Amino acid sequence: FFFLRKPEDRSTPFMPPLCLLVSRMALWRTIGLLVLFILASSPCCTSIPSEVFNTEKDEIQSNLAFFDELFNSNNASIGPLSNRTVLQYESSNGPLNFTLCHLAVFLNNLEVPSFNGIRQAASVLMALHDFNTGNDSIVPQMRQCNVGEFKLRFTMEFVDTIREPLTASTGLLNILQRKNRRVQTAQNGTLVQAYPSGIIGAVRSAVTSPLSQFGSVNDLVTISHASTSDELRSEQEYPLFGRTIPSTTADAVAVVSYFREVLNATHVGVLYANDVFGTSFARSIQTEAGRGNSSISVTLVALPVDASANEAMASLQQLNVTGFRYFVGILFDRDFRTVMPLAYDMGIAGEKYLWMFTQSQLQLMNSPLTAGTNLARAVHGSAVLATVTGNDLLQGTRFYDEYTSRFSKLWNSEVGWKYLQSKLPQTAMTKDLIEGSEPGPFELFLYEAVVAMCLASCDAAEKAGSDFFTANGLYDSFTRTNFDGAYGQVAFDRKTGDRRGDSARYAVYNIVSNETTFNIDATHQQVFKKEMKQGLDNIYSAPRQMVWETYPNEHFIDGSSAEHLFMVERKHQQVFEKEKKQGVESMYSVSRQIVWNAVLNRKFIYADGTSNPPSNLPPLTEDSKRISATAVPLSLSGVAMCTSIACFVWTYKKRKTKVVCASQPFFLYIICAGTLMMGSSLIPNSLLTFDFSQDILNRSCISREWLFHLGFVVTHSALFSKTMRIFKIMVAGGQYRRIKVRPLDVMKPFFILLSIALIFLIMWTTISPSAYVQVPIETSRDRFGRITSSYGVCIWKNDERKEFWQACIYLLQVFEFITILILTYYAYRCRNISTEYNESTWIGLILWIELQLNGMLTLLVNFLISDEESYLTGWSVIIFFFCISVLLLLFVPKMIALWNEKKEQLEKEVRRAERLERLRRFDALKKAQEDEAAGITRGSNALLALETPFNDGTMTEENNDQTDDGDEGYGMKIIASLDDQTTELHQELNVNLSETLSENELLRQSIKSTKAAIINATSLYQEVDE
């Protein structure tokens, strides 16, 4: 049949040289149709009855090497090798024709005995035997291919890659050289050297990459059970590649979900092996971490494959510089054993740190580390995120129970063990390596890979209508294959050949080590939830209605272990609905939401021995911005309150003085109380920066509004009432009538304004009270992006009543603005009244300042509330100036006036004392003159003669003051000199008398000019006092 295919059909995997020589295609088509008719009429190509199948099954059921021996026994008759070999077997019921396909399986650790290598090889052979015999105990779909028209069976051979791409590529090239050649050496036993129809493997992505490329060139489908790199998703480079393990994209979703949902991490460092797998995995984690509202900052650090100690130290130093506490290690076993002890010595592993490893380290479950070493100490309390494995998590499921039971029966038998030894290059292995062991990390995926290849081959044969099908047909059948696997329904992406992430389960395992023991257990489980999301998938999907139900895994036994596990059980069939628009199908993808649940009675033990995860980052160090922001309002509040109290005390002490009496002390008391309330409103405002309970902070927000607005209304209502009282008195004085205005008469506006303010505040507090919201300062961040400082902002508590909250603010502002306007009006009307008895000038200045401050406050509330630092500082400064402007402009002029009054009184007392002193001296001189005149005869040295107008010969204080009639003779003066020897005394007296006369003249003029004012003032004081 090979020679009858069309040469121009490039999808045909085999092209014999003879076909290339033929140019007339019509002739070959005619001959081909004739031969096909003859073959179809022959008995060997008819359907095999079921009773014949049962006989054949009985004959080969106990012989694991049946098809290996069948191939080797016909070496001489087999023509040039291709990926299909048709052989006839003479059974007891007659001849049976089998189409043998060959698989090349690339694994690790085959030449050197190891637990994982032996178990994986045994798993592949068991999968082939189950398919060849139609054993459906593990996978029910196995029997479907054995009851059909085509007798498709498989053989296989193993190649040990030793984890090296060159070694694997060389092994594959050697196998590919068999094409179109005869079997070179007659083989006996179970080793088959046929040309493959497909490739299984390998483990490392770096090894699988060249295998898949070589296979694609030679029309071979490659299915990997362990290579997860996203690089293998490329349709151009790897057109015939598929895998039964989820890609690193699905793994990254699980890793990021664990850090985000369970650990609340914000920063993660990733140390990855610098190859195809490690690079792809690390980039997938970084991409997934950047999605969503709560993104995680990821720092990638590359590690050379098979790194030396110095190279490892350099990479670890880069991790250490980040300051992170959570790390992901994407390492192979050799790098893992090199890096982690160095990390422990460097201090970035162990207590206060958490490391998470990938599937590669899951082999520690079966090959534990030596307890008490630095490597064991470094990984103590760390995690391994991998697909589910082990009895504790899978026991109780149909697939796992049947798999482990069949594996034990098949390979613990003497026949089975000898057959396994015959297929492997290492024959010195002993059965105790796998006896009583559990499946390894990739073992179940490997079994599923072989099953997928076999079922896809059957499907491709059925679609082709013969045993011969193309590689493209096989790959298409593979992507459409569905069967019951270890974790439920196995399904593949139609475009990339990847296993769908929702058809696998994951677990996070906890590594616990001490000085004597080492174990790795799982302690939690995880579930997937599905929700629809429009996006890109493949052209075969459309809006998918997916119904999923999850259930807790109840099959846990003591000593079992999974810290976190994706538990996905499909209860309903997926329904695919296709929509076509303008000839193109709509493309949708399904987003995954992962929820992590703890397994009952299981706790994750971290490196410090507790169940509390370490901090993601070093302790947060707050800067001084918060302290300074608190100090500003508290300082300003203290100054305003102390000033208010000082003014209140001063008013009380000076309440009987003329200046204070004229300023109405009762209203001054109210003004001081109002400014005290406004100043105290800064205290709850500053409390918002402290770490109090939410209830206290909410009350602080409400009390701030009450204190400020009430203080503002009290202060300005008092000013309004005070100004109105002066206005009424002066209006009555202008009408030349006597009026008596008591404080209670002008308190009505005060109570009205206060009542309106109380109504607004009560409605505000009752319906939509202010609440405290801590708003971070975006500009204050440390190197990890953490906010080191924040401010409290008082805004609406309920978003539904946000409009009412804002309306209350606006109404209060409008009300206070109207109060200021009314007060401005009355102050303007009183502007011409003497400022010695009212403060209209100063009140006008206060109102002008407050109008500016109100405008600034409105802008602050409406436009700068998002700038927390500016808002808090601006609010405090504005309220402070509200208080200080009122106090200073009202009380400082009064203090100055009172001080000037006292100064004038003091100067007057000084002048009076000086005049009395001069009178005393004159009296003494006069008396001395009289005494001398009475006892001494007048001569040439006669004493000074004084002329005085006083009739009684005496002088009093009243006589010393000059009158206003201009009589200059009032007082005394020198009229003659008694003796020339008294010249000096005469001169002194003349000077003194001249000064006295000058003072008297000035006093006379002053008294005359102020006489009328004093008379008027007396009547006004009486009215004010009344």
Image (cartoon, grey):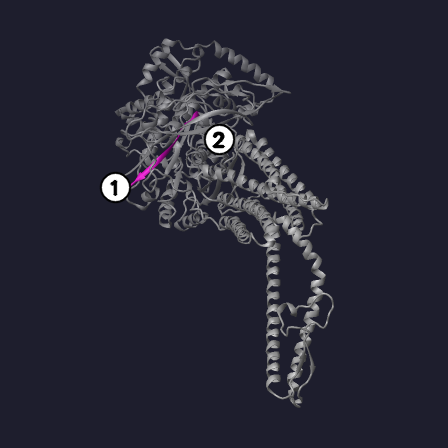
Q: Using the numbered discs, state the Cα–Cα distance from disc 1 to disc 2 in whole angstroms.
A: 48 Å
Disc number lying in front (1 or 2): 1
In x, y percent, where is residue 361? 37, 37
Where is 70 relative to 843, above or below?
above
Residue located beneath label 2 in the image? 215
**Label 2 CA crowd tier, 10 Å (few <14, some 14–19, many 20+):** many
Where is 63 relative to 878, above or below?
above
Magenta span includes 513? yes
In x, y percent, where is residue 671? 57, 46
Residue 147 placement: quadrant: top left
Range shown magenta: 503-516
Q: Which mark is residue 516?
A: 1
Give the residue drawn at x 36%, y 9%.
51
Give the residue drawn at x 48%, y 24%.
530
Q: Nearer the viewer, residue 95 or 875?
A: 875
Give the residue drawn at x 38%, y 31%.
564
- Amino acid tagged 2: Gly
Residue 986 in view in this figure: yes
Q: Secondary structure at mark 2?
A: helix
